[in-house]
Amino acid sequence: RKGSPFLNTAQAAHYLGLSPRRLEEMREEGSGPTYRKHGSAVRYHIKDLDAWSETSKRSSTRQPRPPEKGA
């Protein structure tokens, strides 16, 4: 759908520079971006992808990773 802010898994993975499989694994682990279920379809809102990406910002390779959700 042209102009929709909702992306499927393949589109969201491309947007983030990840493989679709890795994004699926992160969804299963609870460590990926927030997603929504529209019926049986998984959809990611672009704003949620951007917000999740913001949590991954680092200024050094020595900077610790933030704790994962539920940890």
Image (cartoon, rainbow, N blue to C red):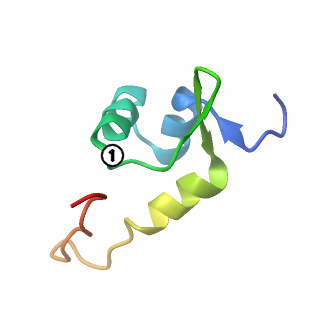
Q: Which residue is mark 1?
A: 30
Does residue 3 appear to the left or right of 38 in the view shown? right
Does residue 45 appear to the left or right of 26 in the view shown? right
Circle 1: element type: loop
Circle 1: residue type: Gly
Residue at the location (38% across, 31% down)?
24
Residue at the location (20% across, 77% down)?
63
Does residue 71 appear to the left or right of 8 in the view shown? left
Q: Position of residue 50 (x, y in %)?
A: 56, 59
Crowd tier of the residue under label 1, counting other residues whose Cα lies within 10 Å: few below 14, some 14–19, many 20 or above: few
Q: Position of residue 38 (x, y in %)?
A: 66, 29
Q: Position of residue 44 (x, y in %)?
A: 59, 41
Find the residue positioned furthest to the left: 62
Q: Position of residue 41 (x, y in %)?
A: 60, 23
Along the viewing direction, whichever of 19 and 39 lies nearer the viewer: 39
Could you say which quadrant of the image residue 65 lies in? bottom left
Residue at the location (31% across, 79% down)?
59
Residue at the location (18% across, 73% down)?
64
Does residue 37 appear to the left or right of 33 in the view shown? right
